[in-house]
Amino acid sequence: MTSHVDLILPPPDNLSSVFHLENGCSGVFVMVVSSRSPKILWRVVGTNGTLQIERGFQGQHGYLVSLYDANGQCKSSFFPFSGVTEELKAFFNDVSENTLKKGSQFVPEHRLSFVEGARDVALLEAMLKSGSRQGKQVQVKKF
C-alpha cells in the first residue's frame, strides 16, 4: 500500500509492502519519508528465525540489525549509517582489480552487478505498482 501524506513531497511518500520469497520466507517492508524521523524497516521470517533491519533507530542514524532464533532469543547490533561508503569501496576495488588483472582472471563483487541492481529496481517497481492498484498482488519480474 502507498499513500501521500506530505504535499511538499512527490507521491508516494509512504510505502508498506508484504512479500513472499521463492524460498518460502515472507516478510514486510515499510518506508516512511513523510515524517521528521524517516523510517525504513525490513523483516523477514524464516523457519529458523527472523531477521529484522531497522533504519533510524531511536533517533540515531544507522541500522539496528536483530536476529531472532527459532527459540525467540534475540541478538542485536547497531551499525552507524555511513551512506554508500562500503559500496563505493567495493566498486573502486573492482575497478582497480579489473585494471590490474585484465581479462578473465577478474571476478567482480556479485552484489555490484547489473543484474543485482536490476533486481532491486524490479522489486521496488512491483511494490509501487501494487500500491497504485490498491494492494493487488504483483509478481516481481525475474532476471
Image: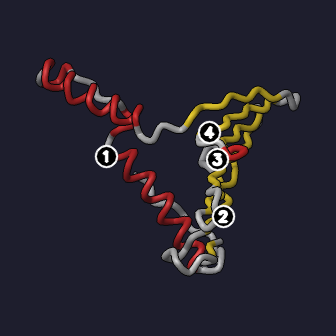
Disc on the earlier residue, 4 or 3: 3
Please report the residue visible at 50 percent of the width from the left and 60 percent of the height from the top.
124
Disc on the earlier residue, 1 or 3: 3
Please report the residue visible at 68 percent of the width from the left and 59 percent of the height from the top.
18
Spatial CA distance of label 1 from label 3 is 28 Å
The answer to which image quadrant residue 122 occupies is: bottom left
Crowdedness of circle 3 by 10 Å Cα count: few (<14), some, many (20+)? some
Q: What residue is pinned by disc 4?
A: 63
Q: What residue is pinned by disc 2?
A: 16
Spatial CA distance of label 1 from label 4 is 25 Å
Crowdedness of circle 2 by 10 Å Cα count: few (<14), some, many (20+)? some
The answer to which image quadrant residue 100 occupies is: top left
Mark 2 and mark 1 residues within 8 Å of each other at the beta carbon: no
Q: What residue is pinned by disc 3?
A: 56
Crowdedness of circle 4 by 10 Å Cα count: few (<14), some, many (20+)? many
- Residue 92, given in percent of the width and then of the height, sits at 26, 30
